[in-house]
Amino acid sequence: MRFRLVFSLLLLSSIGLLASPPTSVYINEELPRESLISTPNSYSTAPIINPIHPWQPRRDDIIGEAFQAGDTYHDQQSNGSIGKMIAVDSDGNVHVTWMDRIDRIQQKYNCRIDDEWIGEDGLDRSSHGSISLTEEDEPQALLFLHAEQDNQNRTYGWAIITSFLDFRFVDNFLYLPDYQDDPVLWPQGCMSSNGTIHIAGLSYDQEDYMTICYVQAYVDDREELSCDFEDPAVVGSTHLCNFRIARSPNPNSERVAITWLKRRWEPIWEHWAADEWNNDLWMAWTDDGDDWNFDEPSNVTNTIFPDNELEPPECYGDTLFPCLTHDVIFDSEDYIHIIFETRGIWWELGENELRSTNDPYLPPCTVDASYLFHWSEETDEITAVADGWFFQYVFEDDTLRAHPTPGIWKSNVCYPSLAYGENGDLYCVYNYYPPNDHNDYVGLYGRCNGDIAVTVSEDNGASWYYPTMVVETRTHLPEPGEALSECYPTVAEVVDDYLHIFYEVDREAGSYLMNENASATLNPVVYQRIPVDEIRRDSIWNGPNFHVGEQSVSNPNDWTPGGFRLTGVYPNPFNNVTTIEFEVQSGMDIKLDAYNIRGRRVAELYSGKVLSGRHSINWEASDLPAGLYLIKLSTGAFAMVGKVALLK
């Protein structure tokens, strides 16, 4: 069997081993020359405290204007894909919603009219709300939430509420039907152009899975909310609270889509990450508002399974897979766009080669490292959007001093939220957790402080610019209550001269509610408007392919800008000895090293000058354990990396 060597064209990072820049970076010296986008084997090293992240030369704390809409003690605004928490109506009024309190959870609402807040209002014993607008000349806010039902023998059910012209909670409140006598929770919804309200929610009706339920509602002639469904329709099943719903903005279209994550196979090992992070992204849709393909939904990502009948590296399957958070939107031409978070998996290597989950230097998955990817219905292509492909380890004298993480249900880039401009630009707002900005809990683990980034695509998601950090605060090792950790960002679908973003500022990173050793702090919730002409559009980020187990990240026949290329490793897989071949265009100093997948160098194969032409170097690895290794050829600022499998 012939085995592939997967190459990637990479740029050496000041805080990471491997990276890949866009072409324009080579000719524009004013742009950053690093970007962490390869296998996440970069580490934070003491005593560096606040290194400038290679993404971003701009250091503004705030771009645009920020306004506090209220505050909250509830530091976990979502436990999955978050619905829209902000909407801007045709009069320019800004509607926001969020959760507050710790005991009797309260969903809150506020509205900004003529640059003034009307004052926050709340509904006790309600939570996990999302917001949309009615399709009217004078739009009203629609809030979807689950709330207490005092007249029934259970606590919660899904509901919908409108805030009418006084912009406050009123009695126009509709509880939706149960699913098989079980309550439905976490509702999200939207109203299509003909006035139909489409709502999805989750019901815990099975031991290991939840049912995604769907109903329709409308505002009747008496301006009351009504629902004709006696029983919700079944969209699909999931084991996560990660689904989204969106409708077309086209007034002549009734298209609606529901997206969700679903476990892609039963894992061959037991760990909580096997349940939460082994997913494909699925979608159901309707073209007329009524006829759905719930019986035959579409698998958007089709990740490649590991197969222990194959030899390495084919047995690994895909390295990347959808994980936890995503968002969906329609463009003005009625095409669906999805952006989803991915993380890496390396330990499902075959039945007898499971990697230890107790190794502190190799978590059972890439807990920190992640990418965002975009899928287009028009092209059925998946392209890279945002880069968080690094570990948050802090080493001192080769000793692991700390491993702070973004926290439960978070990664270095997560919680994407989409908006579409009238000129066709597609925007993605997301959470970014930079290295070396975290708190210092007792022991190995802490929690990283978040920032908010925005990236834009001018070609319907085919390519994405390097991000703009619209909020970039640094509060490294803060005392409780003194942190600035922006989290749970959502962006209004309406883009005028501004992007309209809403988020929470956690005064101590880590969730008090999820027992992450954090204090219960009073946290601002913030509306920020950002002029669209402040969003960076100076250089495209060329990230990796999604199916990296199937395709190379770059063409192995391509030359690096440094004038060299890897041409092969034979044999691959190998048993103790293999030959690495490369070619240089002119005489130069090169380095050839081997790394394990933790990112630690295990062999220095060559360092020195070589003449132009083809070269080969043997690597004898009999003292190393079997597994996947990375061969890195580098000179100056450039590097090329290939994968090779060692068998025993």
Image: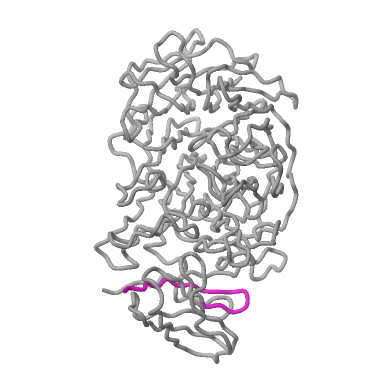
Measured as percent of width and height from the top left, residue 497 is found at 69, 39
Quadrant of the image occupied by residue 515: top right
Q: Main secondary structure of the magenta part?
A: strand
Horizontal arrangement in the rendering, residue 409 relative to residue 233 (left or right): right
Residue 584 position (above or below residue 454): below
Q: Which residues are magenta?
A: 633-648
Question: Looking at this rendering, what residue extends furthest in the left direction?
Answer: 309
Residue 533 seen in the figure: no
Residue 3 seen in the figure: yes
Horizontal arrangement in the rendering, residue 357 relative to residue 403 (left or right): left
| Color theme of the render | one colour
Please identify the quadrant where the C terminus is shown: bottom left
Measured as percent of width and height from the top left, residue 225 is found at 47, 13
- Residue nearest the observer in this picture, 519 or 309: 519
Question: Looking at this rendering, what residue extends furthest in the bottom direction?
Answer: 611
Residue 628 position (above or below residue 77): below
Within the magenta stretch, is there residue 63? no
Measured as percent of width and height from the top left, residue 507 is found at 68, 37
- Residue at (46%, 35%) from the top-left corner? 244
Residue 325 position (above or below residue 250): below
Measured as percent of width and height from the top left, residue 273 is found at 41, 47
Total count of labels: 0
Please identify the quadrant where the N terminus is shown: bottom left
- Residue nearest the observer in this picture, 92 or 468: 468
- Residue at (43%, 33%) from the top-left corner? 256
- Residue at (53%, 28%) from the top-left corner? 130
- Residue nearest the observer in this picture, 194 or 489: 489
- Residue nearest the observer in this picture, 311 or 603: 603
Within the magenta stretch, is there residue 637? yes
Quadrant of the image occupied by residue 200: top left
- Residue at (29%, 38%) from the top-left corner? 296
Quadrant of the image occupied by residue 563: bottom right
